[in-house]
Image (tube, rainbow, N blue to C red):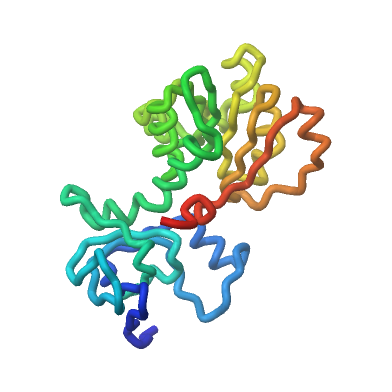
Amino acid sequence: TDVPDPSPAPGQVVVRVEAAGLNFIDVYHRTGLYPNPLPLVPGMEGAGTVAAVGPAITGWREGDRVAWTGVLGSYAEQVLLPADRAVALPTGIDTRTAAALMLQGLTAQYLCTSTFPLGPGHTCLVHAAAGGVGLLLVQMAKRCGARVISTVGTEAKAALARGAGADEVVLYTEEDFLEAVKRLTGGRGVDVVYDSVGKSTAERSLDCLAPRGMMVFFGNASGPVAPIDPLVLSRKGSLFLTRPSLLHYIADR
């Protein structure tokens, strides 16, 4: 669909999109799980070149290479971008790489440094470890010094997870991941579960946690998680439960 070219207001820049990131949240927007008013231009991240700069903008000029995330409407030739959402690209990072990294990379970063700050002595469980966020999260968790147990569905994905640094890889199609986690932790469980799968893994993910562990649901690939009675968290070991969103972790510059 053709729409008018955007014009930047104060505090905005127009970017000529060279690459748009594809993410699972785009599916949620299309299905209506995350409602948006119509008509809708999907896409939450991208990278390109600044084409126009709004009044009173400092720090950006036409021709600058930038990337962004958290701005709806990135499946387009041009995007109207709040200037404080633009991230300058280093010379060695091309726009296709940048568009693939912003949403998933920032998600992995906040999960292991802010939601549950991983460190030496921690053991984490990463579901969907061969996915976009999963591969980055495994690498970052290892850099934090944690032991990483991961789940994947195929041998090919297992190879990817191992290549990213996972200490243990569980094929959930061949072995129950809860039994595997208990076996690999001597019955204790893990300190944190990072779960982007949702409905199909939720109950057993909670059972993977050690006492006072944290359950982090950050996606719904299999469907939304059913409501959880707070008393269940008490019975299973004074557990913590959170359902974070990237936008709250990058609310300001």
State the image coordinates of residue 125 (x, y, percent, origin top left).
55, 29
Which quarter of the image is occupied by the N terminus?
bottom left
Q: Residue 135 vs residue 206: left or right? A: left
State the image coordinates of residue 76 (x, y, percent, origin top left).
35, 73
Q: Residue at x 52, y 29 (%)?
A: 171
Q: Residue 63 vs residue 252: left or right? A: left
Q: Quadrant of residue 59?
A: bottom left
Q: Residue at x 76, y 48 (%)?
A: 227
Asked if 250 appears above or below 208 in the picture, the reply is below
Q: Residue at x 51, y 25 (%)?
A: 149
Q: In front here: 103 or 149?
A: 103
State the image coordinates of residue 118 (x, y, percent, origin top left).
50, 28
Regarding residue 11, the answer to whether it shows in the image is yes
Q: In front here: 47 or 29?
A: 47
Asked if 18 appears above or below 144 in the picture, the reply is below
Asked if 106 appears above or below 71 in the picture, the reply is above
Q: Residue at x 56, y 32 (%)?
A: 173
Regarding residue 168, the answer to whether it shows in the image is no
Q: In front here: 85 or 206?
A: 85
Q: Quadrant of residue 70?
A: bottom left
Q: In front here: 203 or 98?
A: 98
